[in-house]
Image: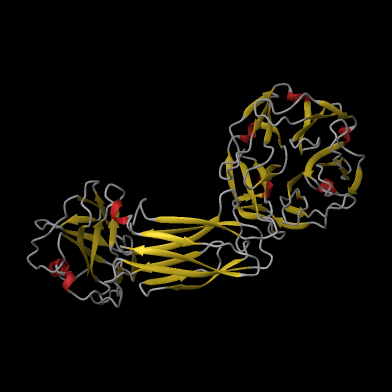
Amino acid sequence: MAGLVSGAGAASAAGQDVVDFEFDNRVLQPGEGWTELSPTGLEGTPDGTLIYTLSKAPLTDPAWTKAGLPTGLSLDPDTSCKAQPGVVGVYLCSISEDNPFPSIEIEAAASTADNTTLHYGAVYAPRGTDLAKAVKDAQIVGSLPQDGTHAARTVTAKTLAHVARNTLALNAPSLRPGATVTHSVTLHAVDEGTLDVSFMPAQGMRDWEEGETQVTLTNVRASSPIADCDASVNLDYGGITCRIDLGQSSPTDVTVSYDLKTGATAAAWNIEASAIYGVYDFGTGNPEKSATFPIVSSRPVPTHYAMLARDKSGNLLWHYGTGKATAPFRDWTENVGRGWGVYNSLAKLSPITVQAKGGGIVGRDTSGVLWYYRTTGVDWEPLTARTKVGTGWGIYNNLTGVGDVTGDRKADLLARDASGVLWLYKGTGTTTAPFATRVRVGSGWGAYNQLTGPGDLNGDGKADLLARDTTGALWLYKGTGVATAPFAARVKVGTGWGAYPQLTGPGDLTDDGKADLVARDATGTFWLYKGTGVATAPFAARVKIGTGWGDTPGTSYNYLF
């Protein structure tokens, strides 16, 4: 296996710390990447010289007749490493607290023969010790005790065809809530390496939050002592790592089995198990295998929603919903766009999921041009490039995305003009012309200084509208699903809402199936109003959820949507 130097390093010159290094064997793919001769672990504070010796044969020959690199290999030492004058294959590297890991890069040309092996030695010479003797020791370090300051290791080039002889097979049956099921990975090992097994949401699933799958990983065992395994208990962000030490057993098969215990209320996740056998230290080419398995559950995976915000610098910030009432957003944000300060009005057309699915966003610039950003379905780049909708939108003093209020499954837009008339722009579902000709909803809407589309607040499957008047009273307009009269008569649902400069309805933030509301007050504090599903009292008492995220204080937000 990849060799380690460990153990008590000898004391340095008088008064210096004891220093203990670790070094590994390395494996290269010809024509792909590089590896470094460098300590992989260090205890103590070094001060002196780290000597590297390079040979085509084991480091046991005092005559040093095989010095240098095998055919196909090349090297690039860092600036702290210098070739020993007059001696082939010896490099002296200055090592100190400020430069504790001096290194030499080794590459293998694409034409390098399979199993080409470089033997390298590493010897630490503390400042004030006999450097000439340390060099001699480094040339024969393979015959010396391997302690914390003396190491003999190898760099081996192995072709893709060679490494492909290591194969993997996965056994990954379905899981069921409340049950424990055994999974396994069988490795046919030709080379030493590291077996890593990890888990992730299968294609089409959203990312999970820690502990959300309710699956724990226990009872990891191997069919052979050649596998030394460690594992984490939590499947969500953990996995299994097994170091495979073949010894004299090459090639051989080993099966690593493990139990997956599923909680009684687990949702219907599809999970991908991935196994990689790491023979190479760098790059592609390591054997890998994956398998997808479901949790067979009647409980669907809840949809999580994102909140979008613009700060005073014009950055568009993506807040990733967690489904947790106490912390409904992750404690960091993604900056998904710059230059959004050009818009004097912004609106999302419907709640946007953390998988970047939803009706998209519109922005109106100062010249009255309306632009449309479609969602991509990719959370790390959630919006497409903008598409021009049209001109003349400067006549409106409010734009509000309200979801589908016409029953055609397309997100719609409301626009209020200066005379207080509210207009409905039905969504078309197309990118080039996302809205149909406007339809008049009604007059008198100038009484409101905030309009918010929160989604379905009363559980009837129809998108609703919230309106706040100048006295701070909040009114609910229940959706009807009828384009010609999209809202029922208003119902007063609270007072005192004038304390909030910004309101937004991101969707269900707490995994209870009810649409919620987020409010930001004048101090930059954010409050969560959990939805109740009851039209007459659609929100529970507010809960404080933060004063900003990451490095962005709440006072710097000037738009929530």
Q: Nearer the viewer, residue 281 or 471?
A: 281
Q: Is residue 47 above or below residue 291?
A: below
Please provide percent x and percent y for residue 120.
21, 62
Q: Is residue 225 above or below residue 552?
A: below
Q: Quadrant of residue 443?
A: top right
Residue at position x 31%, y 48% from top?
32
Q: Nearer the viewer, residue 467 or 48?
A: 467
Please provide percent x and percent y for residue 441.
86, 30
Q: Nearer the viewer, residue 525 or 360?
A: 360
Q: Nearer the viewer, residue 542 or 508?
A: 508
> The N terminus appears in which quarter of the rendering?
bottom left
Please provide percent x and percent y for residue 231.
48, 69
Q: Is residue 37 in view from this perspective?
A: no
Q: Is residue 139 above or below residue 348?
A: below
Q: How many marks?
A: 0
Q: Is residue 220 in view from this perspective?
A: yes
> The C terminus appears in which quarter of the rendering?
top right
Lateral position of residue 368 relative to residue 200, left or right: right
Q: Quadrant of residue 114?
A: bottom left
Residue at position x 58%, y 37% from top?
338
Please provide percent x and percent y for residue 36.
29, 56
Lateral position of residue 132 relative to residue 298, left or right: left
Residue at position x 81%, y 39% from top?
451
* Color encoding of the figure: secondary structure
